[in-house]
Image: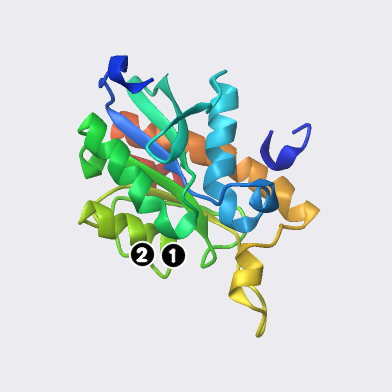
Amino acid sequence: MPFGFGLQSGSESRAVDWIIAGLGNPGEKYARTRHNMGFLTVDLLAEQEKIKLNKIKFKSVYNKIKFAGANCLVMKPQTYMNLSGEAVREAAGFYRVPAENILIIYDDISLPVGKIRVRPSGSAGGHNGIKNIISHLGTQDFPRIKIGTGAPSGGDDLLNWVTGEPSMADREILIKSFERAIRAAERVIESGCQKAMNDFNG
């Protein structure tokens, strides 16, 4: 469960319709931090789909699932956040997945805790993982689902905030947001970003 609460390449098929990439930092030190909302969401997705993200390739841990009627590669880049684009680009190139079918799930300090927002494209908004993905894909036109973590108050350090762990109360809210993000991802793949925005951005 999220937050740890009780809560060989040559023969690999290239049939992948969508890539779902959850962003975060690898290692136990970062496992339950605000910057790992993407990791925690795809971990929950994998749990719900009864798979393990235990294959290693594309500088990621990953697996494939049938999700929302599509063949999806679910991945967690292991490059650390600021180099996420290296992993996403490798997977996209190998499977020939266009940018519009690469769905990125990540944290956003500009949103209140637990609020999710679907977007079909856009700038990095100061998020270094998204900035690196834009650089490596050469486009901003890929869908994304943002999960709000809230922002530090006053002059609190931003790096300490995103690499810090949410409070117990916020964790309960965030677990529900992971479930909503998974449903939003399903809607994006099945019906497109506009439908998902209408249903989940309210």
Q: Badge 1, how many Cα within 10 Å: few under 14, some, many 20+? A: some
Residue depicted at x 38% and y 29%: 73
Residue 113: x, y in percent?
62, 58
Q: How many marks?
A: 2
Q: Nearer the viewer, residue 98 or 90?
A: 90
Q: Residue at x 20, y 39 (%)?
A: 98
Does residue 185 appear in this view?
A: yes
| Image position of 22 with respect to 46: above or below | below
Circles 2 and 1, Cβ within 8 Å, touching? The answer is yes
Residue bearing mark 2? 124
Q: Which of the two residues, 75 or 59, is positioned nearer the viewer here?
A: 59
The residue positioned 23% from the left and 38% from the top of the image is 93
The answer to whether 111 is drawn above or below residue 42 in the figure is below
Residue 67 is situated, as x and y percent measured from the top left of the image, at 41, 23
- The amino acid beneath tag 1 is His
Secondary structure of the residue carrying tag 2 is loop
Kindly identify which numbered label has been placed on residue 127.
Answer: 1
Q: Amino acid at mark 2?
A: Ala
Side (left or right) of 26 relative to 145? right
Quarter that holds the N terminus = top right
Report the Cα–Cα distance between label 2 and label 1. Answer: 5 Å
| Residue 145 percent across, percent down from the top left | 43, 48
What x and y, as percent, mark residue 143? 32, 47
Residue 159 lies, with reference to residue 57, above or below; the image says below
Query: Of the numbered discs in the image, which one, if any, rests on residue 8?
Result: none
